[in-house]
Amino acid sequence: MISVILVNPETPGNIGFIARAMANFNINDLIIVEPKCSHLEGEAVRNSMHSKGILKSAKVWDYNTLSKIKESYDLVIGTSSIVSRDYNIKRTPVFPWDLVISKKTAIL
């Protein structure tokens, strides 16, 4: 099982697009941590197209719940839109065949 976890999403439209992409890959578990907007707003629903069910079943967590991710998942893949200035950070690529080994995976 794969879950997608969004932290502080800012625009409902992006949440909708993510739900749509998730549906394309048959991923249905969406977790939203401390959202800055509603995942059920019109723009989110419009952009999700035929994946409105993912939005409706999305779980909303606070930061305290976020700390339980390590306990809840076998593999957590971290992503960010922010480019790091510290080039000493360990970066390990994850390949699709690595995901098959893990029972519960989160893309954060």
Image (cartoon, grey):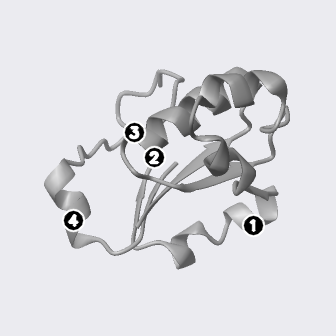
Q: Identify the element where label 2 is drawn.
A: loop
Please tell me which of labels 4 and 3 falls first in the chain.
3
* Local crowd size for mark 3, using a 10 Å CA cut-off: few (<14), some (14–19), many (≥20): few
Please identify, in this view, whether the residue under mark 4 or under mark 1 is nearer the observer.
4
In the rendered image, which residue does mark 2 sit on?
78
Residue 102 rendering spot, x and y as whole percentages: 29, 71
- Asked if disc 2 and disc 1 are in contact, CB closer than 8 Å, the reply is no
Q: Quadrant of residue 88?
A: top left
Q: From the image, state whether disc 4 or disc 2 is nearer to you.
A: 4
Labels 4 & 1 near each other (Cβ < 8 A): no
Residue marked by disc 1: 65
User: Where is mark 3, residue-wise?
Assistant: 24
Q: Quick check: 10 left or right of 38?
A: left
The residue that mark 4 highlights is 100
Q: Nearer the viewer, residue 69 or 18?
A: 18
| Quadrant in the rendering for residue 59 | bottom right
Corner quadrant of residue 15: top right
